[in-house]
Amino acid sequence: MKSSGKISLGLIVSILFVVVFSGCSDITKSKNYKSYKLKYQVNLTNVPDEKKEQVVKRTQSLISKRINSFDVANVNLNRESEGGKTVIAAEFGSIDDINKIKQEILRNDTLVVKTQVEVPEDYQEILKAKAQTTLQTLLDGADFESTAQNEVLSDPERILFSTGEDMYRDEIKEVFAEKLFDMEPGTIYGELIEYEEIGGPLAPPVSVAAIIKLTDKKEVDRVTEYPKEVKVSHILIAYKDAMRASEEVTRTKEEAYALAEEIKKRVDDGEDFALLAREYSDDASNNINGGVLESPAGHEIYVEKFEEAALGLEEDGQISEVTETRFGYHIIKADKVTPYSEESHKEMQVSFGILFYALIEPKWENTELTGEYLKKAETFYDEDYNPYTVITFNNEGKALLEKITDENYNEIIGVFTGQKLRTSFIVEETNHSGEIKILQPSTTKEADELLEALYLEPLPAPIILIEEETA
């Protein structure tokens, strides 16, 4: 902050004191304020010895910068060594969503130019052989998390690393569960696990080879909760134009409400609910059987207002007030109320890591041209005020772009931020300008988000969250 010359230094200091310390006071008084400690292992396996110190310092600086982009207080970063591994411990207080902060710390979706690859016929066997080599490296003692990260970086389209913390058997895919619960903590399963991953209804199954490591196994008290449920009957009084009302329903909304109130009074006076449902209910799917609904309330099967009214009933036989939904007016009877309950029993939990190799065709291959060579990125507008972005590389990047386009004439080149394809084009001539135009952003907001991604400074080395504490 610079003084304009018209405000004294003492006044500026006073203003800063009020803003900073009153802000911190407000934060710490918030009920949402918490203190966090996050520990990150810095993956230096691919960093030359002479550059490791520089990389660690830059990584620590970037973690601090990313944390400070949120509403945080008392940020403190320390470098530690645990079992020969370099660890950065970040302590801070915040009222922000910690998951968003953690995502921002790990964010590495920076600019990279890629070329399309020619798919070899035996691409599945090639990738499976790569997985087998990695498995053997791990069995020989390589660090699992660091090796997994490096594998993902080598082919992020097809290789994925995931972890599971304190999970029960029924929460884990059975092809892994049947192995994990028979393993000892700290061990890696000695063979590739191959299976078919079923995608969505329109997506074909994907062949996968996976490597698993069990990090922890323990027996705990598992509490199973059984939510309250109410078996109900209802009488529906519909009105013209209510959802799913039949063409025979001609009464107005006001007339429907009056009739519902009249039927409610008759039920309260002791008339048989089932007989009234058969006579008056407009729900043709169940009026013949006295309005009995097949599924109980309590499982979010019915619309929200109906669920709330049904779950508000506490005793068998109790009748609700007239309840309005988009289908009309309901009188609801509790046929059987099953209150909330829970039970506890001993069960095993496991924590683990899985390295997935999706045996699918490779599509893109990284080039040397990355955000490291970005000189500037700017948003412009065409005559119809549609935004577009122009990225300009520095002299080294310009030379790389010339080389890439010269060697890939009539081939497709893509510009990515992380795994997101921003633009692609067929190379029709060598690019001597050092510029690429991206037409994708359709709004100014999208253009601004693209600029943010393009300018994101990448972590100089991958990091792994190894510990998290909350106070």
Image (spheres, grey):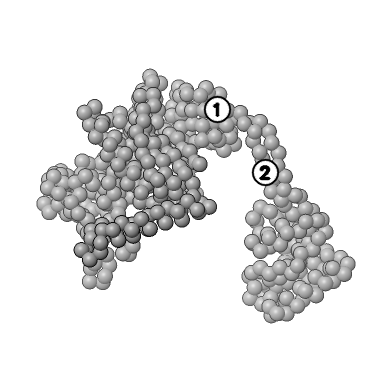
Q: Position of residue 122 (x, y in %)?
A: 33, 33
Q: Position of residue 21 (x, y in %)?
A: 40, 54
Kindly state the secondary structure of the residue where label 2 is placed: strand
What is the number of the mark on residue 344? Answer: none
Which residue does the image show at 63% across and 76% down from the upper left?
241
Which of the two residues, 183 or 453, is positioned nearer the viewer here? Answer: 453
Q: Looking at the picture, does residue 377 appear above or below residue 236? A: above
- For this orientation, the residue located farthest to the top is 140
- Which image quadrant: the N terminus? bottom left
Q: Looking at the picture, does residue 319 appear above or below residue 428? A: below
Q: Amino acid at mark 1?
A: Lys
Is residue 389 in view?
no
Which residue does the image show at 25% across and 31% down from the upper left?
53
Which residue does the image show at 72% across and 57% down from the upper left?
311
Left-right relation of 18 to 12: right
Which of the two residues, 166 or 367, is positioned nearer the viewer here? Answer: 166
Which of the two residues, 209 or 108, is positioned nearer the viewer here? Answer: 108
Quarter-of-image position of residue 59: top left
Which numbered disc flags the more N-terminal residue, 2 or 1?
1
What is the number of the mark on residue 225? Answer: 2
Left-right relation of 339 to 176: right
Residue bearing the label numbered 1: 217
Is residue 63 in view?
yes
Which of the two residues, 21 or 381, is positioned nearer the viewer here? Answer: 21
Count residues near mark 1 (Cα–Cα under 10 Å), then give few for <14, some for 14-19, many for 20+: many
Query: Gap between marks 2 and 1, in whole Å?
Result: 23 Å
